[in-house]
Structures are given as C-alpha cells and as structure tokens.
Image (tube, rainbow, N blue to C red):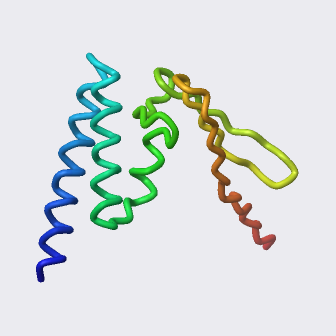
C-alpha cells in the first residue's frame, strides 16, 4: 500500500516536471534540462521504469528535450540490416539509432 502511494506521487511529479520542461524549452533551455534531469532522478529513486516513448524524447547524455529541427536532427538510414532511425542531439552530438520495422508488402491475388 505504501509503495504504491510512493509510486503514484513519483509519477505525478515526473509528469509535472516533464510538462514544465516542454514549456521551459521555449525560453530557457538550461532550466528545461534541469527539469528533465530531476524527473529522471525521481524515476530512478522510486525505481520506476519510464515508457520508451518518454525516454526517447530526451537526450540520454545532456538531458535536453529533443525537438526535431531545433534540438535534434532526425534521419532515416538504409543499410544491409534494414532501416533505422538516427537521432542526433544538436547540443552535445550524442547519436541514438533505433531499428525500424519492415513494412510487409502485401501480395495481390491473381484471379
């Protein structure tokens, strides 16, 4: 019961901090980075696993919110291993590569 309440409080605070980080990015990037860092620390302290969707929105190295064209460069690379999404942080240069699922081609029935 007590642990569940702590997790709820931690999730609330993380959501608030990440929302504030998105708003602060417009005016003060350093403050946005601080909010993201605090949110990730709270998650670690409460031993919460953040969803992949949330984790990919922030640079792992410098904690900058990644906004394509502003703080991040997003490219799709083709290779022999398939396609992958390459996200580069424009603040620190950290590169993340995510594999993309193959699009299956549907075969037409000949009749």
Q: Position of residue 18 (x, y in %)?
A: 27, 42
In the picture, which quadrant includes the C terminus?
bottom right
Which of the two residues, 108 or 77, is positioned nearer the viewer here? Answer: 77
Which of the two residues, 5 or 20, is positioned nearer the viewer here? Answer: 5
Q: Position of residue 45 (x, y in %)?
A: 30, 61
Q: Residue at x 60, y 37 (%)?
A: 87
Please state the total of marks drawn on the protein image. Answer: 0
Q: Quadrant of residue 11?
A: bottom left
Outermost residue to the bottom: 1
Q: Position of residue 70 (x, y in %)?
A: 46, 21
Which of the two residues, 4 or 97, is positioned nearer the viewer here? Answer: 4
Which of the two residues, 85 or 31, is positioned nearer the viewer here? Answer: 31
Q: Quadrant of residue 29?
A: top left
Outermost residue to the front: 45
Q: Residue at x 28, y 26 (%)?
A: 31
Question: Could you tell whether 40 is left or right of 15 in the image?
Answer: right
Vertical comparison of 107 with 87: above or below: below
In the picture, which quadrant includes the N terminus?
bottom left
Outermost residue to the top: 27
Question: Could you tell whether 52 is left or right of 86 in the image?
Answer: left
Q: Residue at x 31, y 58 (%)?
A: 43
Q: Position of residue 51 (x, y in %)?
A: 39, 60
Q: Residue at x 47, y 34 (%)?
A: 62
């Amino acid at each position: 019961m007590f642990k569940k309440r702590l997790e709820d409080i931690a999730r609330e605070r993380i959501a608030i901090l990440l929302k504030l980080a998105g708003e602060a990015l417009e005016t003060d990037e350093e403050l946005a980075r601080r909010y993201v860092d605090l949110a990730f620390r709270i998650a670690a302290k409460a031993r919460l696993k953040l969803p992949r969707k949330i984790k990919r929105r922030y640079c792992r190295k410098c904690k900058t919110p990644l906004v394509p064209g502003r703080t991040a460069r997003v490219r799709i690379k083709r290779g022999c291993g398939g396609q992958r999404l390459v996200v580069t942080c424009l603040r620190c240069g950290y590169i993340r590569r995510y594999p993309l699922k193959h699009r299956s081609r549907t075969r037409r029935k000949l009749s």
